[in-house]
Image (spheres, rainbow, N blue to C red):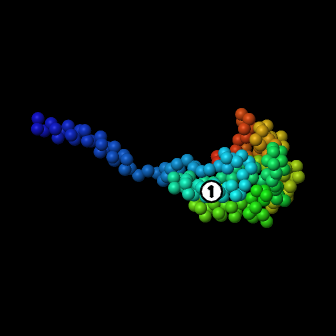
């Protein structure tokens, strides 16, 4: 009987030894790529498509002070930041001579002089946050209507756009073609599904850096 207790103890502890060995096994590096999902604030959820530079900075300061310590580190300027007017669908967007959208300077004054979002992004980055913008895929309808040139090439917007594949959905149908002509980057197939435009990127709400 005196040998029974040590034997039972060894049998009971042996699974724990196996489990401990499994827990300490080195994990692949890709396990560390996304410890959490993207964590941040998106302007559309609070301001729709009317947010201004001042409002972005005010919210970025709040994020730095209250949310960044808990991992919330992405500040995103969402939908229609190139809209200079009353934000109605179908409103003309601000573009450069090559048909590329640029920030509306009445809402984002630091973008004046062709500087884009750089100054705003620098301020957000200085707070320890990542800066993101919303981008729809395809080529803007205004660029197609004006047949703007494509920088660095002999082509124009009408050469790149598939005008037979526009969005039927309300969100983007008034301002975007859903995709460019079929290529390795813009595959063929339905561009709109269930009334909402699909995105060209897994980051539906914007890109960050």
Q: Residue furthest bottom?
A: 113
Q: Secondary structure at mark 1?
A: helix
Q: Residue furthest right?
A: 146
- Please give left or right for residue 118 compared with residue 157 in the image: left
Q: Residues within 10 Å of mark 1 (few under 14, many from 20)?
A: many
Residue occupying the point 61% across, 58% down? 61
* Residue 20: x %, y % from top left: 33, 46
* Residue 108: x %, y % from top left: 74, 58
Which of the 4 image quarters holds residue 8?
top left
Residue under label 1, please give it: 60
Q: Residue furthest top?
A: 194
Residue occupying the point 76% across, 41% down? 171
* Residue 176: x %, y % from top left: 79, 46
One can see residue 181 in this view: no
Towards the viewer: 50 or 24: 50
116 w.r.t. 186: above or below = below
Towards the viewer: 169 or 184: 169
Towards the viewer: 80 or 97: 80
Which of the 4 image quarters holds residue 63?
bottom right
């Amino acid at each position: 009987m005196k040998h029974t207790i040590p034997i039972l103890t060894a049998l009971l502890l042996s699974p724990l030894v196996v489990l401990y060995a499994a827990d300490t096994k080195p994990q692949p590096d890709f396990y560390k790529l996304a410890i959490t999902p993207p964590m941040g604030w998106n302007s559309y959820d609070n301001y729709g498509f009317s947010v201004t530079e001042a409002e972005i900075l005010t919210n970025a300061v709040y994020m730095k002070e209250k949310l960044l310590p808990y991992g919330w580190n992405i500040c995103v300027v969402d939908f229609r930041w190139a809209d200079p007017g009353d934000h109605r669908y179908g409103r003309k967007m601000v573009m450069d001579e090559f048909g590329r959208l640029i920030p509306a300077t009445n809402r984002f004054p630091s973008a004046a002089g062709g500087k884009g979002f750089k100054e705003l992004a620098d301020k957000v980055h200085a707070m320890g946050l990542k800066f993101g913008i919303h981008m729809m895929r395809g080529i803007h309808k205004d660029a197609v209507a004006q047949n703007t040139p494509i920088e660095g090439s002999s082509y124009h917007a009408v050469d790149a756009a598939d005008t037979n594949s526009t969005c039927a959905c309300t969100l983007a149908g008034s301002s975007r073609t859903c995709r460019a002509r079929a290529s390795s980057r813009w595959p063929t197939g339905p561009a709109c599904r269930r009334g909402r435009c699909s995105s060209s990127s897994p980051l539906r709400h914007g890109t960050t850096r």
